[in-house]
Image: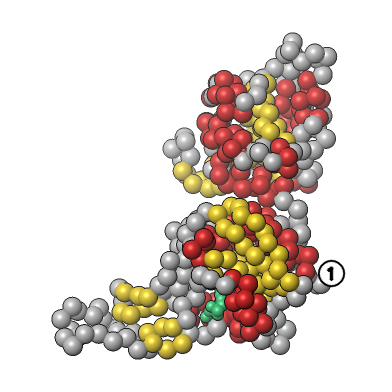
Amino acid sequence: MTAKMASKRILLGLTGGIAAYKSAQLARLLVKSGYDVRVAMTESACRFITPVTLQALSGQTAWTDLWDARIPDNMGHIELSRDRELIVVAPASANFMAKVVHGLADDLLTTLCLARDCPLMVAPAMNRQMWDNPATQRNAAQLRKDGVLFAGPDSGDQACGETGMGRMLEPEEIFEEIEAFFQPKVLAGRRVLVTAGPTVEPIDPVRGITNSSSGKMGYAIARAARQAGAQVTLVSGPTALATPAGVARIDVQSAQQMFDAVKKAVPAADIFIAVAAVADYRVASQAKQKIKKGDRKAGMTLELVENPDILGYVAKLPKPPFCVGFAAETEKLAAHAMEKRAKKGIPLLAANLAQHALGADDNEITLFDAKGEHLLGRGSKIDQARKLVAHVAAMLPRGKR
Ligand code: C5P
């Protein structure tokens, strides 16, 4: 665990709701990522999940009682949140939200919230009628006005058997909001367009030419940019990945479709990061019907024509956004990367060795700009993406929107 990670100190509060079982997973995700997680539970939360579970997962005492004799000076209501950087209440019940709105402090968790010196994030979880009730809506609006951060709720199937708004976000989604909270907002107010994944160049309606790009690096960059405060659009070839929270995704198949989507979105972008592994060639004439095995007895030859260079096009626009290119090489990384940066006429190029990057969860990127090369070291794709985003932010002209 790094010193920086250990500094992410959270108080995780649980109130009474069936979604409390999901908070065990949230605690696990946080601890695994190096967060210091202190847990406080209301009496009703303990009816749904035991403090022992949260204690085992957080590796710390799960606090439940304002009058706990183990707190030496009986100042638990102040001390337990004093050194925290964020309080996250998940699930947050309608009752809890109402109490916070009015500054009530009749148990440990509400007292900690009232006496806090750090931001509060709530992940509401309740039956759809409780959420839609004007009282809850008034309370949610007031909490927002008071600067309380919201993670959800979502709509969908509820434990009570009904369907509607009020479902707690999944633990991974709440974790994402917490991660975003801790990232410096170096791209606040910027609009970022990212391409990611492979393209599929159709041969006939059921076959195509593609490559082994997983999309992981591009998705990590979209996620990091959004966590850094940017408004992010992701133009993606076919991948098996979930859309990063808060990112607008446009799905495409072929290079031509990716080009069309980028042309449409690029006027509203300040930064363009081309991570997609775009096929350089497409099949000249796509068969309208599935090609049958015996159709071409003398063997089969595909005529290929060149695809548009999407990054090349964007970089040559009269007023281009800040352009970042990617280069996956198999050898002579620096030489090829510098040549590519110059050829494309872009300020920044991120290069990696294809054999280290394709499909992997880790990567080792080297950045090339006018000042030379910058090694990002080896790390997870999200760590590399955050470093890349920080580098981009530092290169942007100040005040440019
Ligand atoms: O050398 P190459 O043109 O493949 O450079 C790779 C970079 O250019 C990547 O950033 C890739 O996303 C982008 N690219 C593109 N359109 C293409 C080919 C590559 O945007 N048709």
Near-viewer residue (89 or 212): 212
Q: Residue at x 76, y 34 (%)?
A: 84
Tell me the quarter of the image containing the C terminus.
Answer: bottom right
Residue 340, by quadrant, is bottom right
Mark 1 Cβ inside 8 Å of ligand 1: no
Q: Secondary structure at mark 1?
A: loop
Relative placement, left or right, of 357 versus 401 is: left
Q: Compared to 323, does 298 lie above or below? A: below
Determine whether, in the image, residue 297 is placed left or right of residue 148: left
Ligand 1 sits in quadrant: bottom right
Q: Nearer the viewer, residue 117 or 358?
A: 358
Pointer 1 residue: 398
- What residue is rendered at 73% in x and 30% in y? 99
Is 249 located above or below residue 68 in the figure? below
**Residue 305 visible within the image:** yes
The type of residue carrying mark 1 is Arg
Front one among 103 and 66 = 66
The image quarter in which residue 29 lies: top right
Q: Position of residue 114 (x, y in %)?
A: 80, 30
As drawn, the residue found furthest toward the front would be 332
Looking at the picture, how far across and down is residue 212, in whole percent? 43, 66
Q: Is residue 236 above or below residue 150?
A: below
Residue at 48% in and 85% down: 307
Q: Position of residue 90 (x, y in %)?
A: 62, 35
The N terminus lies in which quarter of the figure?
top right
